[in-house]
Image (cartoon, rainbow, N blue to C red):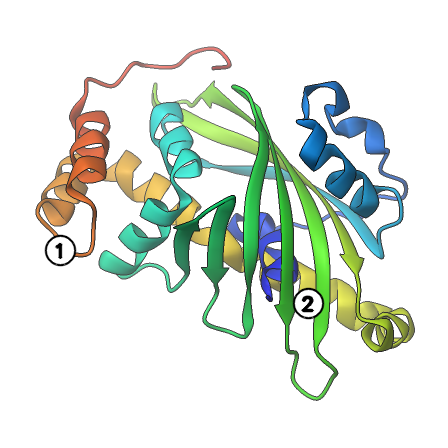
Amino acid sequence: MRLALVVWVSLQAMWIVPAWSGEISPSIIPWDRLAPETSGLVREVVTQPLVAKQVNGIAYRSRPEIFRYLLDHPDFAATMARVIKIGKYRVTAVPGGYEADDGRGVHGLLRPVYADARRRVYYLAGRYDPPLLPTMTGRAVLVLDTSHVGSPDGGSRAEVTVVGFLKVDSVLFRIVARILREFTQATVDRKVRRFFRHVEKVSVRAYDDPAGLAQEIQGHPDLAPGQVAEFRRLLLAPVRRASVKD
C-alpha cells in the first residue's frame, strides 16, 4: 500500500519551505510512551532510514480545538475537504488505523501511535508507483510538533515542525533511489506537502468563515451526522482570543 511515502510525504503536506537537516536523532521519539507492540515497528524505521528530514517554519491561521479535532479524525477531515472541494484524499477507518489514498498512486495504512497536547507520532506502511520507475514499498514515521500562538489580530496561528523518517523496503527502488537521490528527496517533499494539505485548508477555512463552513456541512450525506454535530459545535463556539502559546 502506497501510503508509506504518501503519509510521510504527507504531513509535510501543508507546508511550503522544506529544510534538510543533517542528522536527526531517534531520541525525538518518546520511546517510553509508546505501546510495546508499536515501539519495535517505529524503531525499525528511525534507526536506518533512507531519508530523514525536518521541516521548520510552518505557520497558518488555526484554532487549536479545530486543528486537534481534524488530527483526531483524519477520515472526517479528508471527507470534509472533498465535500467543500479543497482536497482529494480518501481516508477510511479500519481496524488498527486508517487506509488512505491520495488519488495520485499512493495508498497504504496510517497508524497514530502517540499523541499528547503538542506532539503526535504516526507509523505508516504503504506503496507508491512513480512514473518510469519501479514500485516502491516502504514504511515511514512522522513526528508532528504543534503549538498555537497569538496572532496580531487577536486570533491564533499554528506553528508546526515535522520530522519524517522513510525506510524503503523495495530492494530495486532502494538502489535506484540512492542513485537518484534528488528524485527521492523531491518526491518525498511533494507527497508530504499534499497529504495533510487538506487539514491545513480546512483549518484556515474554519478560522476565516466558521459560520459558513458550519452551514455548508450541515446534513451532508457523505459526512457522519455525529461528527458533523461535534465539529459544528466547535466551529460555532465563542472564540477564545490567544495571546500566549496554547
The local secondary structure at tag 2 comes to: helix
Task: Bin the neighbour count of mark 1 within 10 Å (Cα to Cα): few under 14, some 14-19, many 20 and up.
Answer: few
Tell me whether circle 2 and circle 1 mark residues in contact (CB < 8 Å). Answer: no
Tell me the residue that label 2 is attached to: 187
Number of the front mark, 2 or 1: 1
Seen in the picture, residue 219 relative to 131 is either above or below; the reply is above
Tell me the residue that label 1 is attached to: 221
Name the amino acid, label 2. Answer: Thr
Q: Position of residue 164 (x, y in %)?
A: 71, 45
Q: Position of residue 108 (x, y in %)?
A: 56, 61
Q: Position of residue 167 (x, y in %)?
A: 79, 56
In the image, 76: left or right of 162? left
Quarter occupied by residue 82: bottom left
Quarter of the image with the N terminus is bottom right
In the image, 81: left or right of 217? right
Q: Specify which label sits upstream in the sequence, 2 or 1.
A: 2
- Name the one closer to the observer, 211 or 145: 145
- Name the one closer to the observer, 53 or 94: 94
